[in-house]
Image: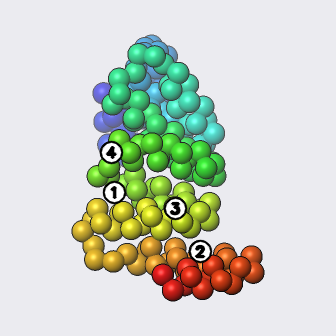
Amino acid sequence: MEGLMALASGDEKLAYQKFRSVVQQDTENVEAYLKLGDLMRKKGKPEKALQIHRELTIRPSLSEAKRMQVEKSLAADYLATGQFEKAAQILEELWKKEKESAELGEKLLSAYEKLASWDKAVAVAERLSRLKGEKGSPKAALCKVMQGRAQADKEDYHQARIAYKE
C-alpha cells in the first residue's frame, strides 16, 4: 500500500524501495512485482523489467486477469528494448481478448510501424478508426503511403502504384 501511495504522489524512489521490500517479504505478491518491473522500465532499465515480468509468466497460479496484466507489462518491456516482433505477438493476442481496447491497438500499431509491416499497420489503423467511430483513417492512409515507398525502394513500382492508389 505504501508503495502505491508513493507512486501516486510521484516519489518513484520511495515506491521502488517499498515494492522491493514487499517482494522480499512476500514472493507471492504479483502486483508488487508488476509495479517493480514497471518502475524499472520507467527508470531506463527495460532489460531488468523484462526479466522480472518474464519470471512472472511461469507462475502457474496466476489468474487470467493477472496474466493479462503481466503480458501488457511484458509487451511494454519488449517495445522499450526494441524487440518489436515479440511485442507485436503479445499485443496481437491481447487485442484478440480485449477487442475494444484502443490502447492495445495503438501499441500494436506502433510495433508494426517500427517493423515496417505496413499491411498489418493499415489493418490495425483501420480497425482503430472504426473502434473510435472515426470516418476514414488518416493513419491508415499514411501507412499505405509508407507501404508504397517501401515497394518503390524495392523497385516494385507496380505494387507501389497500387499502394498509393489505395
Residue 147 image position (x, y, % from top left): 59, 74
Contact, CB < 8 Å: mark 3 with mark 4? no
Residue visible at 35% across and 63% down?
128
* Residue labelled with disc 4: 98
The mark nearer the N terminus, 3 or 4, is 4
Q: Amino acid at mark 2?
A: Gln
Residue visible at 32% across and 49% down?
99
Q: State left or right for residue 93 relative to residue 101.
A: right
Indicate the quadrant where residue 14 lies.
top left
* Residue labelled with disc 3: 120
Per the image, label 1 sits on a secondary structure element best described as helix
Q: Amino acid at mark 4?
A: Glu
In the image, farthest residue toward the front: 158
Contact, CB < 8 Å: mark 2 with mark 4? no
Residue 125 image position (x, y, % from top left): 42, 66
How far apart are labels 1 and 3 at the CA level? 16 Å
Q: Is residue 156 above or below residue 55?
A: below
How far apart are labels 3 and 2 at the CA level? 10 Å
The mark nearer the N terminus, 3 or 2, is 3
* Residue labelled with disc 2: 147
Classed neighbour count for the residue bearing mark 3: other residues with Cα under 10 Å, few (<14), some (14–19), many (≥20): some
Residue 52 appears in the rendering: no
* Residue labelled with disc 1: 102
Q: Amino acid at mark 1?
A: Ala
Q: Is residue 157 above or below residue 64?
A: below
Contact, CB < 8 Å: mark 3 with mark 2? no
How far apart are labels 2 and 4 at the CA level? 28 Å
Contact, CB < 8 Å: mark 1 with mark 3? no
The mark nearer the N terminus, 1 or 3, is 1
